[in-house]
Amino acid sequence: MTTIFDNPAEFADDALDGFVAANRNYVARVDGGVVRSTEMNPNQVSLVVGGGSGHYPAFAGLVGPGLAAGSACGNMFASPAAGQIYRVAKAAAMNGGVLLSYGNYAGDVLHFGQAQVRLNAEGIETRTVVVTDDIASAPIEELEKRRGIAGDLTVFKIAGAAAEAGLNLDDVERLAIKANYRTRSLGVAFDGCTLPGAEEALFHVPAGKMALGLGIHGEPGISEHPMPTASELAELLVSKLLADKPDDAGNEVVAIVNGLGTVKYDELFLLFGRIEKLLTAAGLTVVEPECGELVTSLDMSGLSLTLLWLDEELKEYWAAPADTPAFRKGNSAPRAQRNVAAAAEVEAAQLEIPTPAAAALGLQAVSAVAAIRDVVIEHEEALGNLDAIAGDGDHGIGMRRGVDAAAAAAQKTADLPGGTSVAAVLTAAGEAWSEKAGGTSGALWGTAFIAAAAALGNKDSYSSQDAAEAVGAFANAITTLGKAEPGDKTMVDAILPFRDAFLAAISSGTEVIDSLKEAAVVSRDAATATSALRPLKGRARPLAEKSLGHPDPGAVSFGLIVERLGQHFEQELMESGTRA
C-alpha cells in the first residue's frame, strides 16, 4: 500500500515534482510532464512518450539522451490530457518533427490523437506509433487491439536511439513500427495494487493462485491458475511468447523480465536464469537483456516477460548508448544544459496580435461558450441518468466539468491586454475542456473546439463561408479522432446531420443564425432517432440491449447545445439590432 503522501489527489504531481528535483541534470518540469534538460541536435526528431503516473521508471524516467525527448504524465493510471501532451511535445520539439508513442489504451489514443492534430495544424509534423505488445489482450490476428505493457521500453529505446543518431522522422517512425511488431509480452500477478489513499487493492488474487494476463493499470488477469514454481512459470511465459512470435522472427532476442512493483530483484534474477536456459534450448541467442523494474504498476505483486526479436538494424539501436534517470546503456557523450523556461517565455511573447474582426468575434465566442455552459448545467442530471442506462452515468458531470473549465478559460483569454482573437479564445476553451473533463467526450469536444479555432484563424473579416468552414472542421475533428461512423450510436449521429444541414443552408444563401437554427432542429431529431440504434462504439457497446429505446447521451447533449446556440445568437441579434 502507498503510505507516503500528503493529499492523495495531488500524489502524481507531488511525485513528479520530487522526481525532477532529484534529476535536474536530466529533466526539466513543464506544464504536463517533463522534457530533456540537456541540449538536443537542432534537427533531431523528438520522441515524446507518456501515459498515466504510477509506472515508474515509465514514463518520465526514460527521458534523456538516446531515449525520449519528453514525457507527458497523467494522473494515477489515467491518460494525460491532450493539452498536457501538446505542451510537452511543443517544449520538446526541435526541427525534425515529433513522434508520439504510448501504450494502446482508449484514453491515451484519444488524448494523444487530439494533441497530434493540434501539433500538425501548427506546422510541427507529428506521427504516432502505439505499443501493442500484450499477447493476452487480443489474438495475433488482431494485434492492433492489444494493450501496451512492458514492451513500451523496446519501442521507446529503438525510436529514441534512431532519433539520437539523426535519422529523419520517416525512418524513426518505421523503426518504431518494426520494433513494436517484433515485441511480445505476457504478465502475471500474485496480488493487486493500491492507489494512494485507498484502503483496498484494486483486486486480489486468491491465496495459492496466480492471475495470468494482467494489465498495468490495476486490471486483474484474464484467468487464474495454481501458483507455479519458478521453473513452471518460466516455461509458461516462454512457451506462450514463442507460440506468438512474429512471422519474420530471427534467432536473436532481447529478453526483459520486468517487476511490477513488489517482486524482489532476487526473485526476478532467479526467474531470468530459468528463462534464459529455455530460450537457449529453443535455439535463440539472448542479446543485451534487462532484468528489473522497468514498467511498474505501483505496488502490484507481479511480473512480465518481454521478447523483442532482433534484426541487424534493431540490434544496432537497442545497443546504442542511452543516459536517463532510470535507464542507462553504453557511454553517452555529455550534453550542455538548456534553459527550457526561457524558451517557453520567448514563445509566449510571440503571440499573434488579433485583428479587430477576430477580436470582436472572440468576444462573441466567449458569450457562446457561456451559453453552452448554461445549457449543460440545466441538463446535467438528465444527461447523467440517460448515460447510466447503458454506460457509467458520468456524461452529465463530465460535460459539466469540461464546459465549466472551457467557459473560464475563454473569459480569461479574452481579458488579456490588447484583446484576443476568436482562434485564441476557442483554442483555450478546447484545451481546458479536454483537460478538465477527461474521458472520451472531453477529448472529442476539446479537439473539435481547437479545430474550429484553426479554421476561423485571425482574419481581417469573416463571412458565412468562414462559419461553414468552422462547422466542417468541428465535425471532421470528431470523426477523425473518435473513428465513429453514422449508425454507431454516438454523438456523430447528431453531428453529421447538423453539419450537412448547416452547410446546405449556407450554400443556399441562408444567413448564419437561421442556418444554425434550421440545422439544430435536424440535429435534435437525429439525436432522438438514435433510440432505435444499438451502440457499436464506446462503453455502452457491451450493454447494447439495455441501450435500445433510449437515445445516445452524446448525441442528445450535442443537440441541446446547438439548439441553445441558435437561441443565444438570435437573442444577441435582437439586442444589437444587427444581422450576423
Image (tube, rainbow, N blue to C red):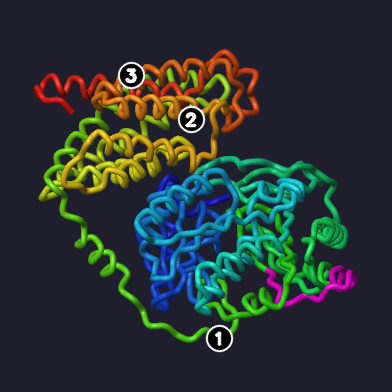
Instruction: Look at label 2 and name its amino acid.
Output: Val
| Location of residue 244 with respect to 518 vertically, above or below | below
* 515 on left or right of 48: left
The reply to whether residue 376 is in sight is: no
* For marks 1 and 2 on the same chain, the one whose residue lies earlier in the sequence: 1
- Residue 245, horizontal then vertical, whole percent: 79, 60
Residue of label 3: 518
Q: What span is colored magenta in the figure?
A: 277-291
The reply to whether residue 551 is in sight is: yes
- Residue 110, horizontal then vertical, whole percent: 50, 45
* 307 on left or right of 227: left
Label 2 SS: helix
Which of these two is toward me, 519 or 430?
519
Within 10 angstroms of label 2, few (less than 14), some, or many (20 or more) residues? many
- Residue at the extreme top: 549
Within 10 angstroms of label 1, few (less than 14), some, or many (20 or more) residues? few
Residue of label 2: 492
Q: Quadrant of residue 156?
A: bottom right
* For marks 3 and 2 on the same chain, the one whose residue lies earlier in the sequence: 2
Label 3 SS: helix
* For marks 1 and 3 on the same chain, the one whose residue lies earlier in the sequence: 1
- Residue 16, horizontal then vertical, whole percent: 43, 59
